[in-house]
Image (spheres, rainbow, N blue to C red):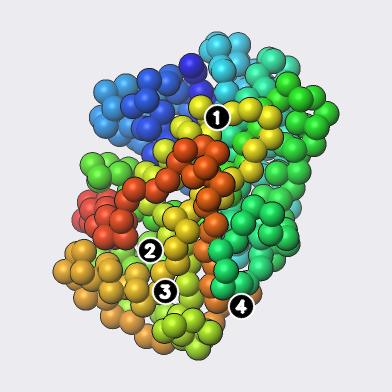
Amino acid sequence: MKILVTGGTGYIGSHTSVELLNSGYEVVIIDNLSNSDASVSDRIGRITGKTPPLYIGDVLDEALLDQIFSEHKIDAAIHFAALKSVPVSMADPLLYYHNNVTGTLSLCRAMKKHGVKNIVFSSSATVYGISDDRPIGEDAPLSPKNVYGNTKLMMETVFSDLYHSDPEWNVTLLRYFNPIGAHESGLIGEVPEGIPGNLMPYITQVAAGLRPHLNITGTDYDTPDGTGVRDYIHVVDLARGHIKALQNLSGLGIYNLGTGRGYSVREIVNAFEEATGIKIACEEAPRRPGDLACYFADASKANAMLGWRTEKTLHEMCADSWRFAKGYYK
Ligand code: NAD
Ligand code: UD1
């Protein structure tokens, strides 16, 4: 089977391409390199022995999509291509709606034109937008709190409406919790642009000596140690969830991909220090506006219906994040 991976040179797309190739799928990548670089397809080739063709271009470019679907007999698409910064999305909503939502419409039109009706979509736990100390199930209310989250919910709506208009579509929406870690080869991983907004890329920059300390944003939450709790998932486990999703693609499916267990910021810092032997200087800082105290998945539906479960430990998430970052920043 041949899979079109949009955003395939990005963080999650590259790891998923590796797992696809290792599982015997053929991969074709389209990426406009707005947040990645072309060397990633060669790195995928070094890991798997198969370098996937990379079309450098935009999913907004329907002529290019037309060309790809004409040149390759694509069986399904996995749609990662999107912009993902919450603060930038608030500052420039038109950019985010255009890139993410219009880009998705463009992809769907091209798929429909070429009779390809199988898609797995990268959604996010950010669509829930609620704070609770219970695990979040797929039927929790949807109420994103920022423009990025709004684009994800809109894209989910596009896909589910498409399915309801034509049940020949098979659509799986995957709601990721917090991906961290990297491939054990150290060849691919997350490359943050500018000052990292997310926790693990910030920690690795402190470890690399690029930043003096980590600001722990909120130490007075109603959590066991006062710091925010999230469901961190190893990106390789997450990537493997896409293989399971493809194997079980049938009708409309919605799944959380998380470990089902939350860790606090302090627990992550401690685990990183243990895994790497590097001390992370920390300072207490105010809460980030709009942040939630505690957020973790009920992943039982993906466990039961997709036969998927996470295998990697927090230690591996930290060690693998650092192996990639160390090589990247040296
Ligand atoms: P990423 O930025 O590393 O990868 C996205 C890739 O898409 C990049 O290589 C970028 O160049 C490309 N891209 C963006 N817009 C494009 C366009 N219009 N046309 C072609 N290529 C385009 O991000 P990631 O962390 O790998 O995220 C992948 C997907 O998963 C995104 O849809 C993101 O919203 C979603 N997601 C990510 C997280 C996370 O924490 N990383 C969490 C939940 C959901
Ligand atoms: C963020 C995004 C969310 C996205 C998710 C996964 C926001 C508001 N939300 O959520 O849309 O789906 O990433 O990519 O940005 N922290 C620190 N210091 C830091 C950075 C973070 O203490 O420098 C804390 C945060 O307060 C939080 C935890 O670390 O408690 C995790 O933060 P982060 O990695 O940004 O993930 P989310 O907050 O879950």
User: Which residue bears the numbered disc 4?
Assistant: 289
Pick whichever of labels 1 and 2 is earlier in the sequence. Answer: 2
Kindly give the residue lying farthest to the left in the view shown.
Answer: 277
Say which quarter of the image contains residue 211.
bottom left
Kindly give the residue lying farthest to the front in the view shown.
Answer: 304
Say if 24 sits above or below 216 in the image.
above
Count of marks overlaid on the render: 4
Q: CA distance from mark 2 to mark 4?
A: 19 Å
Pick whichever of labels 4 and 3 is earlier in the sequence. Answer: 3
Q: Are marks 3 and 2 in contact (CB under 8 Å)?
A: no
Q: CA distance from mark 3 to mark 1?
A: 33 Å
Give the residue displayed 42% in from the left and 21% down from the top. 25
| Amino acid under disc 2 | Met
Q: CA distance from mark 1 to mark 2?
A: 31 Å
Q: Secondary structure at mark 3?
A: strand
User: Which residue bears the numbered disc 2?
Assistant: 200
Determine whether the beta carbon of the residue marked 3 sits less than 8 angstroms from the nearest atom of ligand 2.
yes
Q: Secondary structure at mark 4?
A: loop
User: Which residue bears the numbered disc 3?
Assistant: 264
